[in-house]
DNA sequence: CTTTCTGCAAACGATTTGCAGCAGC
DNA sequence: GCTGCTGCAAATCGTTTGCAGAAAG
């Protein structure tokens, strides 16, 4: 958490007005949660976050995450695993999808090629238009076994 | 559930050996669950299934679904909604993706064009190959508001 | 100061599980 | 018959919530 490049500072100044706009205070706990999420390249579970955050009540983390989600700053991923996973909203980072490991439940990010995204977009527009569905966003997950689990169990 | 075309009979004769292969009996409850899932065009929740199945204990449905999933005959969809949704495995029906409504939690099927699927496949192969991830399958969901909810609430 | 948070512990609710009797083969 | 399944009720466990004291502004 050294932040030599001022990335966190920049992040906080993006997040702060969003919360204020939602009538929320940008408290120390919320800042901590945001920092933890910013300091990783994969969506984290509540236990992950608690382990990295120092002293924070579990209930506060749950509550804060829900508020951050309502404010559009954090995104929840339900992977089928026992825990939900949380990450910063794509708007604060970059568009990506997920690799979900069916053995260990771990979720990792992957950034799609422009080619994939543009063909995806054009087709999705058609589908939603023809079914009267108002598309907000899409979710593309690759399900399988991560490198580590493959190594361990074949 | 008239089944004039014998579709259900055919389905049962596909499912039965799979269960036997997994050391499971194809009991009346399990047949019923399969029939209910076959009789709809969208993934159902446990309450949905109970409402359509006649008299079945909730715990048996939960238990049976898990066994059917282990046997590869049923597939679980976690939509972020309070309940999980269940559908027949694609192998018993056809490949498709989902439209998930963020307002009412309803999940509907959509069948992708060949164009989408083939570009998806080629890119996904690349991604998984380069990350050491053993790809089993993919999941593409469109998230938004369904036609009905749009009509009701704008 | 007033309002909104936090931490604790208790409540919730979807899903799982133990057990006694019943059905599949 | 033996084994595996069902139904019921109780237990589990991730997540939510009520409340009294503590920070934010």
Image (cartoon, coloured by chain):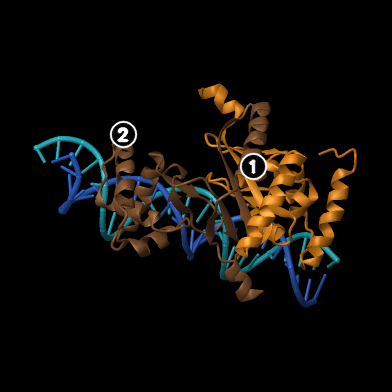
Chain colours: A brown, B orange, C cyan, D blue
Q: Residue at x 60, y 51 (%)?
A: A141
Q: Residues within 10 Å of mark 1 (few under 14, many from 20)?
A: some
Q: Residue at x 63, y 31 (%)?
A: A125
Q: Which marked residue is nearer to the observer: mark 1 or mark 2?
A: 2
The reply, left or right, for residue A149 in relation to residue A94 is right
Q: How many marks?
A: 2
Q: Position of residue A83 (x, y in %)?
A: 49, 57
A62, above or below B147, in the image: below
Q: Position of residue A123 (x, y in %)?
A: 67, 35
Q: Which residue is mark 1?
A: B48
B151, above or below A137, in the image: above
Specify the subunit that label 1 lies on.
B
Q: Residues within 10 Å of mark 2 (few under 14, many from 20)?
A: few
Quarter assignment of residue B100? top right
Q: Position of residue B99 (x, y in %)?
A: 63, 38
Quarter assignment of residue B143? top right
Q: Residue at x 44, y 51 (%)?
A: A87
Q: CA distance from mark 1 to mark 2?
A: 39 Å
B45, above or below B15, in the image: above
Specify the subunit that label 2 lies on.
A
Q: Which residue is mark 2?
A: A21
Secondary structure of the residue carrying tag 2 is helix
């Amino acid at each position: 958490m050294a932040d030599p490049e001022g990335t966190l500072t920049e992040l906080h100044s993006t997040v702060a007005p969003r919360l204020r706009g939602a009538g929320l205070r940008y408290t120390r706990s919320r800042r901590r949660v945001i920092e933890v999420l910013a300091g990783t390249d994969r969506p984290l579970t509540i236990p992950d976050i608690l382990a990295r955050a120092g002293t924070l009540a579990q209930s506060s983390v749950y509550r804060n995450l829900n508020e951050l989600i309502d404010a559009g700053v954090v995104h929840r991923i339900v992977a089928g695993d026992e825990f939900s996973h949380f990450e910063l909203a794509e708007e604060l980072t970059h568009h990506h999808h997920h690799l979900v490991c069916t053995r260990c439940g771990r979720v990792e990010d992957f950034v799609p090629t422009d080619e994939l995204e543009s063909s995806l977009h054009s087709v999705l527009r058609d589908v939603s238009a023809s079914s009267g569905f108002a598309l907000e966003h899409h979710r593309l997950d690759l399900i399988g076994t991560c490198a580590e689990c493959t190594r361990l169990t074949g």
